[in-house]
Image: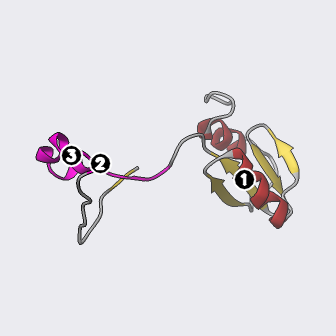
Amino acid sequence: MNTGKKGTLGYLASSLFEREEPMGYRLVIAEKPSVAQSIAKVIGADRRQDGNLEENGYLVSWCVRHLVELCEPQDYDPILRALSGNLFSIQHKRYSYIF
């Protein structure tokens, strides 16, 4: 039984597990629907479902927001919150990401 909201990854995942036929898909997750459609066209996944495109052993779905983004300067050091972003650029040996 689907417990997620239609169009969400939870809904997609729960609907996949309800299928009777054996699974064997390669999942491709794109940042937005237009990118997903471009990828699906190239790999031949042209059968449209609710929240995904599938065919040819591929299931292509998409998100609505960024999956990963760089941390803001103040996330590295709170003192950087007071500085204007136009006055400096930060360079780190290692960058932090938000998921």
Q: Amino acid at mark 1?
A: Ala
Residue at mark 3 to residue at mark 1: CA–CA distance: 33 Å
Mark nearer the N terminus (3 vs 1)? 1
- Label 2 SS: loop
Q: Is residue 22 magenta?
A: no
Q: 53 or 81: which is nearer to us?
A: 81
Residue wearing tag 2: 72
Q: Amino acid at mark 2?
A: Glu
Q: 59 or 95: which is nearer to us?
A: 95
Is the residue under label 3 in contact with that under label 2 (CB below 8 Å)?
yes
Residue wearing tag 1: 36
In the image, 23: left or right of 82?
Answer: right
In the picture, the disc for residue 74 is 3
Please tell me which residue is depicted at 23% across the width and 56% down the height of the picture: 88
- Label 1 SS: helix
Residue at mark 2 to residue at mark 3: CA–CA distance: 6 Å
In the image, 36: left or right of 73?
Answer: right
Q: Which residues are magenta?
A: 67-86
Q: How packed is label 1: few (under 14 Cα within 10 Å), some, or many (20 or more)?
A: many
